[in-house]
Image (spheres, coloured by chain):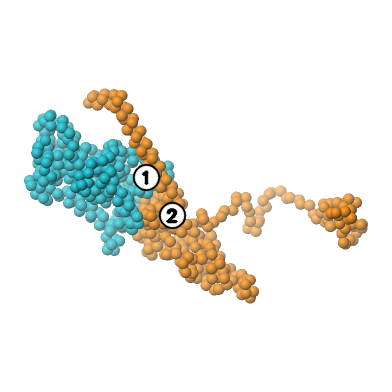
Chain colours: A cyan, B orange
Amino acid sequence: MSEKTALPVGQEAIRDKGWWMAHRFLILRRVAQAFFLGLFLLGPWFGIWWVKGNLAGSLTFDVLPLTDPFVLVQGLVAQHWPEMTAIIGALIVGVVYALIGGRVYCSWVCPINPVTDAAHWLHDRLGLAKGWQPKRGTRYWVLGMVLVVSALTGTIAWEFVNPISMLHRGLIFGMGFAWTFVLAVFLFDLVVSRRGWCGHLCPVGAFYGLLGHGSILRVSAVKRSECDDCMDCFAVCPEMHVITPALRGADEDTPIILSPDCSNCGRCVDVCAPDVFKFTTRFDTTPAPARAVRRNKQRQPEASRAA
Amino acid sequence: MSAAPKRNATPTSRRRFLQDAARAAGACAVAGMALGKLATDARALPAQAIRPPGALPEEDFLAACIRCGLCVRDCPYDTLKLAELGIEGPATGTPYFTARDIPCEMCDDIPCVVACPTGALDHGLTNIDDADMGLAVLIDEEHCLNALGLRCDVCYRVCPVIDKAITLERRHNERSGAHAIFMPIVHSDHCTGCGKCEKSCVLPGEAAIKVLPRRVAMAEAADHYKLGWEDRNPMVDDIIDLPDRLPGPGTDNLAAPGGYLPDGMPDPSMDGGFTPSFELPGTGGAGQ
């Protein structure tokens, strides 16, 4: 591997592209997270009731109903057939995320994302071991478990513990002791399992991932031939297994990251100095020749330094 | 491409797969049981937490309510709240109100029900007088001022369904012997459980009249019970001919108690025997 891997993550990109271009999607993402949370807080904090409700269900400008499809699905398996308002709301949300990527919810909207990102930042600063790393399919097991419990108990089961609703509803309607759930997730990601919650366990993310399985908007390693093995994309990617097939693929393999686990956060686009990655559609057929053969290097443990 | 299935078919990887699946299933079973415990515990709705008008029965409510809080937002009197974690109340995030703090003002247009996107608050409820949030119960007659013979009457006066849900029933005041007691009586067929009475009860601290969920406040008549003064139809179709009670020798008369014939009377001199102290005319010297 090149000596560039020794540089701090993103240094090279800042040097080559400037600070803004090396951070734009991160900044935009934080702005989006603050924006969506802010919309909900305008009412309770400033009396401007553009948006009422919370992420589970909301009403915007008194006309646009939005409903979390995962919550609605749990209600359905718990054998409650909802009113049309909730169904329309869930369809709107479902279609949007199916087009732009289900896990866009995770990285651009979900209020727990800054919490786990903060945990990961501190985790790195403290140089902690990655800890327990559940299998990749674990989140789908959790998703199945939630649906089974919903069906058996006749309740919307995940909402009893969902840290996303706990935090979001807590900020908007009153926190109580809901902050303990948020703290638990933070500590879990900090000391128990690196990228553990959002990356391995959260059934909401699993659901949205499935929802966006065929999403249009995708990141593509279109200039993968220019990759210089600095490993920065692996270091910043919260779901780093999604990069490998696209970046390390052969000529005939698509350079588009098609894994539903990819949350379209765009951080890989930021930190790549040679601009290998870019946002595109899944139908993009721009030819993307593979990197020059580096058999010996490919055998090296690729993700050893990756976060 | 054919390499992948072949690799998966090796005994080691199959065993590995089964082990991983068993491990995941086991972990999910444990986590699921914990989650299921939380979910079933949440059904234990505290008696003082009243659901909004039109709320489905509690076991259906938790399948329907997505905890969005839109009913809370559209409540013009800030009556409704979303339950907060760890603070005594119903399941976290679900709407409720505490009548003693802010009761339901029974809006004609029922905005909370209209706002509910899922029907956890039943959209079939269009007349607020049909609401059934609970039932007011005069729970402490020892401290209720009206029950003590004073004229407080506040619960009766504030009731939105005055003279139907709460009436004042005049009783004799046994203590003074000369006054009346105007007893507040709640009628379950008209009470909506809005809690205005509980809110306005003048006693400090707890109210003497409280709204309770109907499941707590009401008993149930057995299926076969019949109130004869409300329903004149006899229980059985055939006329039952009960024996007539007439003086004279027979099944039951004073001259021969228990149907004893005069000659079969117990000896008056013996223990348990007796002599009637009177004679009935025309019975032939009964009782000797």
Quarter of the image with the C terminus of chain B in it: bottom right
Residue B96 at x, y = what percent?
Answer: 41, 58
**Residue B111, x across and y down, in percent:** 38, 60
Using the rendered view, name the quadrant where residue B102 is placed.
bottom left
Q: Residues within 10 Å of mark 2 (few under 14, many from 20)?
A: many
Real-space Cα separation, disc 1 to disc 2, in angstroms: 19 Å
The kind of residue tagged 2 is Ala
Q: Which sits in the foreground, A4 or A169?
A: A4
User: Which residue is at the front of the view, B214 or A241?
Assistant: A241
Q: Please, which chain is the residue tagged with disc 1 on?
A: A
Q: Which mark is residue B55?
A: 2
Taking the spot 40% from the left edge, 42% from the top edge, the residue there is B33
Name the residue located 27 percent from the left edge and 49 percent from the top edge: A186
* Vertical side of B16 occupied by B112: above or below: below
Instruction: Please tell me whether mark 2 sits on a helix, a strand or a loop.
Output: loop
Contact between marks 1 and 2 (CB within 8 A): the answer is no
Given the image, on which type of amino acid does mark 1 rest? Answer: Gln
Q: Considering the image in quadrants, where does the N terminus of chain B appear?
A: top left
What's the residue at 86%, 51% (across, down)? B260
In the rendered image, residue A22, in percent from the top left (x then y), is placed at 12, 47
Labels 1 and 2 within one chain: no
Name the subunit of mark 2: B
Residue under numbered circle 1: A74
